Amino acid sequence: MRTVSDIIASFGGPSAFAKFFGVSKSTVNTWRRRNYLPPERDLELVKEAHRRKIDLTYEHLAKIRSVDAAA
């Protein structure tokens, strides 16, 4: 996973991701556009990714944030 967009796509797209998190699709689209995911959701996100057999780790999330911070 290189971007938030990759993560969202792996969950089935913005609508599926929004449903999982209990937020609006527009919120997910904003996260995708900003390449941002709320850090307080990391545990929930990684657990669900593992349940769905999606290769997503805390290291992936840290790398996405470090690239974003460097920009």
Image (cartoon, rainbow, N blue to C red):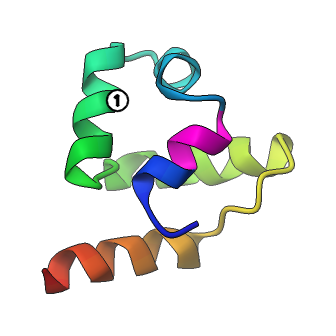
Q: Is residue 13 magenta?
A: no
* Quarter placement of the N terminus: bottom right
Q: Which residues are magenta?
A: 7-11
Q: Position of residue 32 (x, y in %)?
A: 32, 43
* Quarter placement of the C terminus: bottom left
Q: Position of residue 55 (x, y in %)?
A: 76, 62
Q: Residue at x 17, y 86 (%)?
A: 70
Q: Is residue 52 left or right of residue 3?
A: right
- Residue 44 seen anywhere in this rendered image of the structure: no
Question: Which of the 4 image quadrants contains residue 27?
Answer: top left
Looking at the picture, does residue 64 appear above or below residue 56?
A: below
Label the magenta part by its dominant secondary structure: helix
Q: Position of residue 41 (x, y in %)?
A: 44, 45
Q: Position of residue 43 (x, y in %)?
A: 56, 53
Looking at the picture, does residue 26 appear above or below residue 52?
A: above
- Residue 41 seen anywhere in this rendered image of the structure: yes
Mark 1, residue position: 28
Extreme-left residue of the structure: 71
Q: Residues within 10 Å of mark 1 (few under 14, many from 20)?
A: many
Judging depth in this view, the residue of 43 and 23 nearest the camera is 23
| Secondary structure at numbered mark 1 | helix
Q: Residue at x 47, y 25 (%)?
A: 14
Question: Which of the 4 image quadrants contains residue 58?
Answer: bottom right
Judging depth in this view, the residue of 1 and 57 nearest the camera is 1
What is the three-letter code of the residue carrying label 1?
Answer: Val
Q: Is residue 58 left or right of residue 52?
A: left
Q: Residue at x 22, y 34 (%)?
A: 30
